[in-house]
Amino acid sequence: MSTTWRVADVVSGMPENDTARTIGLKVAGLDGSLPGQHIDIRLTSDDGYSAVRSYSVAAAGMDGLLQITVDELADGEVSPYLVRELVVGDQLEIRGPVGGWFVWLPSDPNPVQLIAGGSGIVPLMSMIRAHEASTNPSRFRLLYSLKSPEAGFYRSELETLGRESGRLAVDYVYTRAVPPGWSHAPQRLTAESLLASILPADAAPEIFICGQTVFVETVSEWLVQAGYPTSIKTERFGGTGGNR
Ligand SMILES: Cc1cc2nc3c(=O)[nH]c(=O)nc-3n(C[C@H](O)[C@H](O)[C@H](O)COP(=O)(O)OP(=O)(O)OC[C@H]3O[C@@H](n4cnc5c(N)ncnc54)[C@H](O)[C@@H]3O)c2cc1C
């Protein structure tokens, strides 16, 4: 973990959907990250004004490479620049990876329930990728709440893993538009549909929830009321608008 600012080279940019893209960074001396950690990015303008925002690590190797996925907030200060303007060859100042609580360790033998609202999938994807790369036989289950199928991040990877992994099950909740042939109309997550789609409390899963503040707080409350342990791990991305 590094708490000093250092320079990262932008080495790739790949759209995930209309508003989000995955950005590849090369950081000299970086030796991986724990699944779930984030980095801070500092942008500084010519007049010295600077803005710092946090972005979860979506994937990281031991070769100095890491990926983040940024969702654009139309009225935001930093995210539109990262999604629309940053190009390969640019440089960014970064700090981290940081964070020691919202992490999954490949040595953890417990089953894991992941619950994502919108861009909250990013740190959970890092956990899924680390789990797939490990020999840990524990069960992973992901519940992914999103506006529409087109709004999903990592779509083909999740589809393939959900079909072939054997250690990962993926469930979706679509809040505004559903895929063709879906069994029901778009709906927001409810306590009932949540409990029907996740590992039961008596399986004693480790639970990680990530998304906007309202989403995370609502889901955590439902779980505690339903008898899940209070050791649920949460990460709030900010914002108050519910699922994205
Ligand atoms: C630990 C951590 C990890 C994060 N990881 C990611 C990530 O992987 N991908 C990602 O896209 N974002 C992530 N975020 C959110 C990110 O840090 C920024 O808050 C986000 O990109 C908005 O920044 P901005 O400068 O564009 O908007 P701002 O100028 O800061 O805000 C513009 C408006 O949007 C509201 N707002 C701020 N954040 C959000 C939000 N997340 N959702 C909805 N409304 C918001 C503000 O209240 C304000 O009204 C993370 C946040 C934290 C704390």
Image: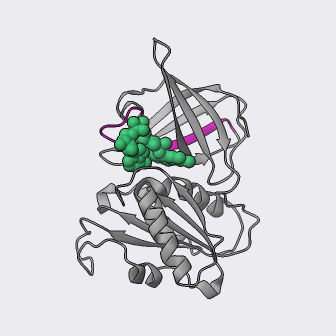
Please identify the residue farthest to the top as the structure is shown: 47
Q: Is residue 85 visible?
A: yes
Task: Please say whether residue 77 is one of the residues in the magenta stretch.
Answer: yes
Identify the residue shown where x is 48% and y is 77%.
Answer: 222
30 over 116 or under it: above or below: above
- At 61% across and 59% down in the image, what residue appears? 127
Give the residue displayed 47% in from the left and 82% down from the top: 195
Indicate the quadrant where residue 243 lies.
Answer: bottom left
Which is nearer the eye, 162 or 170?
A: 170
Where ligand 1 lies, by quadrant?
top left
Classify residue 191 by image quadrant. bottom left
Query: What's drawn in magenta, residue-wise?
Result: 63-78
**Magenta span contains residue 84:** no
Q: Position of residue 148 (x, y in %)?
A: 29, 62
For residue 77, side relative to residue 96 (left or right): left
Q: Give residue 199's position: percent from left, percent from top.
A: 55, 81
- Residue 15 seen anywhere in this rendered image of the structure: no
Q: Residue furthest bottom?
A: 202
